[in-house]
Amino acid sequence: MKNNRKLIYSILAALAIVAIILIAIIFYGKNSPLSVVFLDVGQGDAILISDGSQQLLIDGGKDGKLLLEKLGKYVPFWDRKIETIIETHPDADHIGGLIDVLNAYQVDAVLETKMQSESQTFKKLEEIIATNNIKKIEAKKDVTIKFAGGGVAEILYPFETVIDINGKDTNMYSVVVKLMVGENKFLFTGDLPTTEENKLLSIGFDLNVDFLKIAHHGSKYATSDEFLNKVSPADAIISVGKNNSYGHPNPEVLQRLTQHRANIFRTDESGDIVYECININSKCERKSL
């Protein structure tokens, strides 16, 4: 009789724990604010956009172990799914870490251009996508991703299907994404060079945003005065590695940003840079870590 009571109490306790976990998951999904995290992955790009249990990962840096460590900090332990991944272009410092992510998380869809690379990193990533039967969507203008809380991520560039798929300058076709959360606007530019920035300007897009991810880690070949005049960001975020061999960010770019009165935040100095959009009717705020 006593043993039966112990068994019943154990079952009830287990059910209570499960119920608490389920309540926590439901509460988290409904009440956590949309966040944008510029992950410190060294000399590379990785941006995590989360709205409750829904995630969009733009690029993945070069180091898969480091990326998984970062995701573990911002994605709840019970959430083993990343709904969407965007590869801006097939350079190793943008896609290398995604290999481990695809092995560790369930991924519904990968958005990428038709740009190819001869690197083993790119080939391995494509192999895993095919093996896991992950849906591939061509990344080009007008493709959108909607978040449950009302946010919308829209691809602005490339304008159409990439034809020069084996071109040497992969940066030219970097995917550009604009995120709109109420009145807040973010622009993520991959490694887009000035020549392609000019094409965005010529189309007449509304590029005025609050938060700009500076292209190509602050390279001097991007982020022109003309582009900054149009974008006019309040905050400029540079994803860059400490003491990198490229000299990023370029002093001229930093000077231009200062002249345009943008607040400059760098992952090599600040680590992860986090914005929380608690209410779509108010300004997204940078969170102190």
Image (cartoon, rainbow, N blue to C red):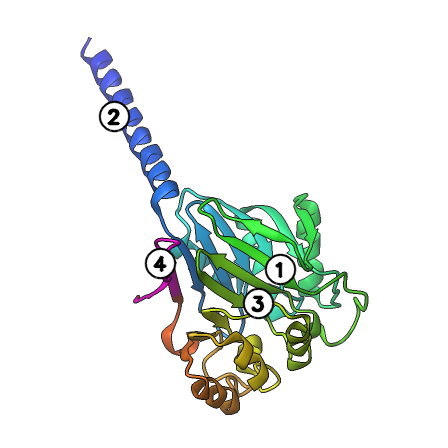
> Which one is in front in this view, the residue at disc 2 or the one at disc 4?
4
Which residue appears at 69% of the width and 80% of the height? Answer: 195
Q: Secondary structure at mark 4?
A: loop
* Residue 200 screen position, x and y as percent: 65, 72
Amino acid type at image mark 3: Asp
Provide the residue designation for mark 4: 282
- Lower position in the chain sequence, tag 2 or tag 4: 2
Where the N terminus falls, by quadrant?
Answer: top left
Q: Most extreme residue toward the top, as rendered?
A: 1
Residue 40 in the figure: left or right of residue 193: left
Amino acid type at image mark 4: Ser
Question: 153 or 173, which is in the foreground?
Answer: 153
> Distance of mark 1 from mark 3, alpha carbons?
13 Å
Does the image show residue 59?
Answer: no
* Residue 182 screen position, x and y as percent: 44, 55
Provide the residue designation for mark 3: 206
Decide whether residue 282 is among the magenta residues: yes
Provide the residue designation for mark 1: 155
Which residue appears at 43% of the width and 87% of the height? Answer: 258
Please provide the residue range marked out in magenta: 274-288
Provide the residue designation for mark 2: 13
Which residue appears at 53% of the width and 67% of the height? Answer: 187
Amino acid type at image mark 1: Ile
Which residue appears at 18% of the width and 12% of the height? Answer: 2
